[in-house]
Image (spheres, rainbow, N blue to C red):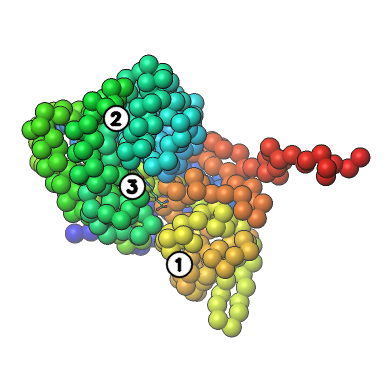
Amino acid sequence: MASVLEKEIKKGIRLHDFYYLGKDLYCEKVRVREIVESVGTPVYIYSHRTIVEHYRKLAKAFRSVRPLICYSMKANSNLAILKSLIAEGAGLDIVSGGELYRALRAGCDPAKIVYAGVGKTKAEIEEAIRAGILLFNVESVPELGAIHRVAQSLKKKVQVSLRVNPGVDPNTHAYIATGKAESKFGLDLDTAHAIFVKREEYPSLSICGIHVHIGSQIVTGEPFIKALRKVLIFIASLEKEGYAIRYLNLGGGLGIIYSDERPQTADEFAKELLPLIGKKKFRLIFEPGRFIVGNGGILVTKVLYVKQTTMKNFAIVDAGMNDLIRPTLYDSHHEIWSLEKDEKKKKWVYDVVGPVCESGDFLARDRHLQEVQAGEPLALLSAGAYGFSMSSNYNARPRAAEVLVKGKEYFVVRKRETYEELIRGERIPSFLQSK
Ligand code: LLP
């Protein structure tokens, strides 16, 4: 049975806190046009409520085991978003020294930070150890050695989880599938076991956790269950051999609605997972990114020109692949809503394309949209995750502004970049300086 939300999404009238009131598109209690008029376009607009609610849904669904939910900040690392989630009790999942810096600047308790990624540098490892993070998620034997050596030189004992690769196909886009055997991520179970056997060789490490993340935008519970079953069997065999496991980190990957997906809810997810976990002694950790912020953001862009060719109607807009690269990179779908819905207007088929000089610079192709006009703003939905955080300055385009809406108020949480900021840090070598 379709839920009320599903029906509303199908009709194109609501996605969580983005909805039409009369003709106008709102975010929470603010008319989106009002933001666009004062901040301009392109602009990312986030709903504080949608974001916080998604965190709460997951926390509530798993409350019986009190997991540590480390928001995966690569999805969207704006300080205001981090602070909103930290205030709810979230920890953070980081993958770089830069993310550690942002996490600490946002006031995250280091004891709630977990650090993943296949290529941590010595400097990054040292910064994280000095900060006192909870766990490193280790992805290879040489990395384990590197963390051990840095810990030894700092005279610290450091907690480590081994990221295992369970060889499960998550049925998602190839670029965001990470748990298959040929992936660069994680350790196979035999190698992970061998590390436990040799753990005496790493006296500065406490190897006390298992981490698994099989991919992203996974809409059914099945791949998670398959991976969990494999990992639980592995943990049971480790425990039999006397190795204590204190943390089981199940990663992120929960899918969201982009068009007609029907992803599992947090409750459905918990109902499937919790019976398998039972009353185990380890602390459960999750690292959701997209699930928390994905539906909580839109990208608003303005139509610059409508161009008709013999083959196509192009709506040329002021946001490009540098602002939202997901359609180009993954052929991903983002719903496009007008700021003023008018059922009487004709529908046309458009390619919505950006100003960047690349054929791959499109936001939507062959999309049925209410007739658009130059000057009109359009909203791309479900752009809260991997939108701004993957944006770039390609074509020397300043990055978009970001706005956070809370109730009746809105706040610019990142100013639009200036031209001056585009060249920050660049230097003209002396031989090119005019005398
Ligand atoms: N944990 C680890 C170890 C990860 O690698 C990721 C995402 C997450 C957690 C969070 O995954 P999520 O809950 O957001 O699915 N740029 C792509 C997604 C890349 C995901 C990378 N890793 C996209 O736009 O779809």
Residue at (67, 44) in percent of width and height: 422
Q: Position of residue 32 (x, y in %)?
A: 52, 48
Query: Residue 343, labelled with which disc?
Result: 1
Disc 3 packing (10 Å; few <14; some 14–19; many ≥20): many
Query: Residue 233, labelled with which disc?
Result: none
Q: Position of residue 168 (x, y in %)?
A: 22, 54
Disc 2 packing (10 Å; few <14; some 14–19; many ≥20): many
Q: Is residue 322 above or below residue 141?
A: below
Whether residue 230 can be seen here? yes
The one nearer the camera, 255 or 329, is 329
Q: Is residue 252 rendered to the left or right of residue 95?
A: left
Q: Measure how far apart labels 1 and 2 are at the Cα level.
A: 56 Å
Residue at (61, 39) in percent of width and height: 415
Disc 3 under 8 Å from ligand 1? The reply is: yes
Query: Residue 160, labelled with which disc?
Result: 2
Residue at (30, 44) in percent of width and height: 186
The one nearer the camera, 395 or 373, is 395
Residue with the mark numbered 3: 185
Please report whichever mark, 1 or 3, sits nearer to the chain's N-terminal start.
3
Residue at (11, 42) in percent of width and height: 233
Q: Position of residue 378 (x, y in %)?
A: 53, 58
Which circle, 1 or 3, is nearer the viewer?
Answer: 3
For badge 2, the amino acid type reads Val
Whether residue 3 can be seen here? no
Please report whichever mark, 2 or 3, sits nearer to the chain's N-terminal start.
2
For badge 3, the amino acid type reads Phe
